[in-house]
Image (cartoon, helix red, strand yellow):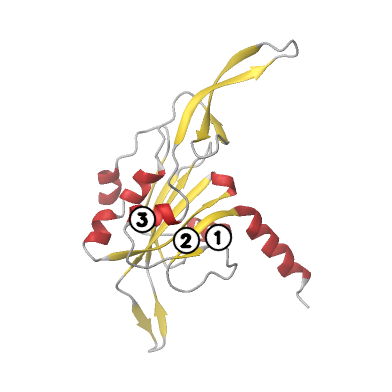
Amino acid sequence: EIPLRLVGSEMCIRDRVETMAYAGEVPWHGLSVEVSNALTPNQMMKQAGLDWTVDQIDSYATLPNGKKVATGMKARVRSSDDKVLTNIGQIWNPVQNEEAFEFFSEYVLAGDMEMHTAGSLKGGQMVWALAKVKDSFVINGRDRVDSYLLFSNPHQYGKSIDIRFTPIRVVCNNTLTFSLDSKSDASVRVGHRVEFDADAAKKA
């Protein structure tokens, strides 16, 4: 018999993991596509089902009389299915998924990292990409510690881009939240009110 608390946890995972791809060990929830660890960032993006863009269009409210009036807000709409991901203000600098994955290209091409996991959570409101650093170390001769570079790219109002090194292998909303909540000496956050500068983020 499966404990009820585990059933509830699995249901929560299935509700939040929309699409995902992984290399290496199978994620415990199994909701993903297995890929080679030799993929380019762009190939990983496509295998994870993230090769879509987000457009910003004017948002309207429908009055009781049927008339539509502009709200002064904009809606972020996903190109693959016209889904509205969030409503935003007029000042918002989007980062497309392709830009997020391109961030890893120079490291992967140099052989320093390999794409490891990537996916969409909460119906597309959160996209992440995770690359594994090829250098690891062992504690007490038996416990291997891996390092990953995480890029979380939210398509949701009030959330910031977060890029950091982490020892946590992100495979679901829980592990992503745990990683983002953990302290990191090598991390940078960028709000959507400023234009994303990949070179500045790498230097930081």
Q: Label 1: which residue?
A: 172
Label 3 to label 1: alpha-carbon separation: 20 Å
Q: Label 3: which residue?
A: 43
> Which element carries disc 3, helix, strand or loop?
helix
Depth order, front residue of 22/131: 22
Q: Closer to the N terminus: mark 3 or mark 1?
A: 3
| On screen, residue 128 above or below 135 | above
| On screen, residue 18 above or below 25 | above
Q: Label 2: which residue?
A: 21
- Location of the N terminus by quadrant is bottom right
Q: Residue at x 31, y 55 (%)?
A: 104
> Which element carries disc 1, helix, strand or loop?
loop
Asked if the residue at tag 2 contacts the one at tag 3, i.e. Cβ–Cβ closer than 8 Å, the answer is no
Q: Closer to the N terminus: mark 3 or mark 2?
A: 2
Name which residue type carries label 1.
Cys
Name which residue type carries label 2.
Ala
Label 3 to label 2: alpha-carbon separation: 11 Å
Asked if the residue at tag 1 contacts the one at tag 3, i.e. Cβ–Cβ closer than 8 Å, the answer is no
* Residue furthest to the bottom: 141
| On screen, residue 118 above or below 57 | below
**Residue 84 numbered mark, or none:** none
Q: Closer to the N terminus: mark 2 or mark 1?
A: 2
Judge left or right: residue 122 versus residue 128.
right
Q: Residue at x 29, y 73 (%)?
A: 135
